[in-house]
Image (cartoon, rainbow, N blue to C red):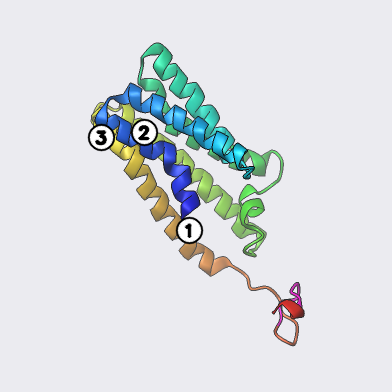
Amino acid sequence: MKKFLFDLFPLILFFAAFRFADIYTATAVAMVAAVAQFAWLKLRRKVIEAAHWINLSVITVFGGATLFFHNDAFIKWKPTVLYWLFAVILLGGRWVFNRNLMQKIMGGQISMASTAWDKLNLAWAAFFIASGGLNLYVAFSGHFTESQWVNFKVFGLMALLIVFVIAQSVWLGRHIQESPKDPAGVPASGNKDSV
């Protein structure tokens, strides 16, 4: 839970700054928060995940363009670019490099057939593509205000992610394979002394 809130830190500050000021102040605050978050991880010698690097790069480029050109279209594109980058990484890893990144991330905790891993990888990629497209619709269709887009970015996309994770958990429950056990009932890869 602490890690989840830490990862949301720039987004929470973006929302708060927008409520008290405007989209440009909120963008600047989010950029400073992302850099501070990254520096904190470095100073504490914590693991810096690929997602942290990607998020920092995207917020720096699109946030910087928003402030430099004084054009909020750049920051509105940011969630879409981030999500579509994740989708490209998942699909490219599987189709170009023949590596299932979802299996690489979660394979240490659960065991599934390779076809199930491929479906999971594809489902996450599809989720990121759809969420990125939905962000563009809310941001640029003309049917929503800037304030409504900010609410969607902070709460709507988060709610979609939570619903997707719950649905994925139900699906995973039907496809997880139990570890083979020896006659004594201990997992084949386990150590009896540690049970």
Q: Nearer the viewer, residue 109 or 68?
A: 68
Query: How far across and how far down the image is residue 114, in percent?
Result: 66, 58
Marks 2 and 3 sit apart, C-alpha to C-alpha, by: 14 Å
Q: Nearer the viewer, residue 116 or 54?
A: 54
| Amino acid tagged 1 | Gln
- Asked whether, in this view, residue 52 is left or right of residue 194, the answer is left
**Magenta stretch encompasses residue 62:** no
Query: Which residue was labeled with disc 3?
Result: 148
Task: Residue under label 1, please give it.
Answer: 168
Question: Where does the magenta region start and end?
Answer: 186-191
The answer for how far apart the CA atoms under marks 1 and 2 are is: 29 Å
Identify the residue at image location x=62%, y=70%. 177
Sequence-wise first label, 1 or 2? 2
Q: Which mark is residue 19?
A: none
Whether tag 2 and tag 3 are in contact, CB under 8 A, the answer is no
Is 21 drawn above or below residue 117 in the view shown? above
Q: Horizontal and vertical percent for residue 38?
A: 55, 35
**First-in-chain label (2 vs 3):** 2
Q: Which residue is mark 2?
A: 14
Mark 3: which secondary structure? helix
Q: Is residue 172 above or below residue 120?
A: below
Image position of 108 (left or right of 189): left
Q: Quadrant of the C terminus?
A: bottom right
| Res 134 visible | no
Compute the Cα span from label 1 to label 3.
28 Å
Secondary structure mostly seen in the magenta stretch:
loop
The secondary structure type at the circle numbered 1 is helix
Given the current orientation, which residue lies at the most extreme front position? 43
| Residue kind at label 2, given as amino acid type | Phe
